[in-house]
Amino acid sequence: MPSPQEIEEKFWSALASDMTMMLGLDGVEDGHARPMTAQLDGERGPIWFFTSTDNTIVQKLNAGSHDRAIATFVDKGHDIFATVHGSLTVDTNRGVIEKLWNRYIAAWYKGGKDDPKLSLLRFDPERAEIWIDASSMIAGLKVLMGADPKKDYRDNVANVDLRS
């Protein structure tokens, strides 16, 4: 049975490797979540996202209408699932842009780091619910043997505070 800290570590490790989150504004009617590439500067948050100024999330943030966000994550192996709540801001930190810039990001911006449509989002995670997959095959075997697989699965979920 993993501890909440171990589950949190698995989340950060998986996010650093797989990098795709669904990001949206919390409680906004048309703030649909969008797939975004997450960038970490270190082992934990904040989580950074490069996007464009015409992205609906950026437009709503620039209008000052909202800063609460929610991001969901599933690693490629479907072993880690997470829902992360926090605050989201447009950030113009040139040092972060320089540090995280790479050829994959550059492919999206004709003007490079000075492209007028370039926008950097900073997601400061506050709390998360993280699940470690309980294999359905193992659950099926437990049912065949008369055991309740739900009991073991409860130990594979953690509610964690992500504020440093």
Image (cartoon, rainbow, N blue to C red):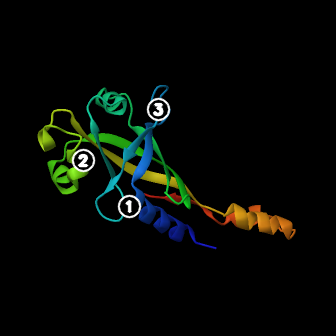
Image coordinates of residue 153 in percent, x first then y, are 69, 63
Task: Please determine whether, in this image, residue 6 is positioned above or below residue 58.
Answer: below
Q: Earlier in the sequence, mark 3 or mark 2?
A: 3
The mark found on residue 32 in the picture is 3
**Secondary element at image label 1:** helix
Q: Are marks 1 and 2 in contact (CB under 8 Å)?
A: no
Q: Which residue is mark 1?
A: 16
Q: Which sits in the foreground, 161 or 26?
A: 26
**Which quadrant would the C terminus be assigned to in this image?**
bottom left
Residue plotted at (38% across, 61% down): 16
Query: Left or right: 124 with respect to 7?
Result: left
Q: Which residue is mark 2?
A: 105
Q: Report whether residue 164 is seen.
A: no
Residue plotted at (38% across, 44% down): 36
Q: Please, which residue is most extreme toward the bottom here?
A: 1
Q: Please, which residue is most extreme toward the right here?
A: 146
Query: Left or right: 93 with respect to 36?
Result: left
Query: Left or right: 114 with respect to 72?
Result: left
Q: Nearer the viewer, mark 1 or mark 2?
A: 2
**Secondary element at image label 2:** helix
Q: Which sits in the foreground, 88 or 104?
A: 104
**Residues under labels 3 and 2: Cα distance?**
22 Å
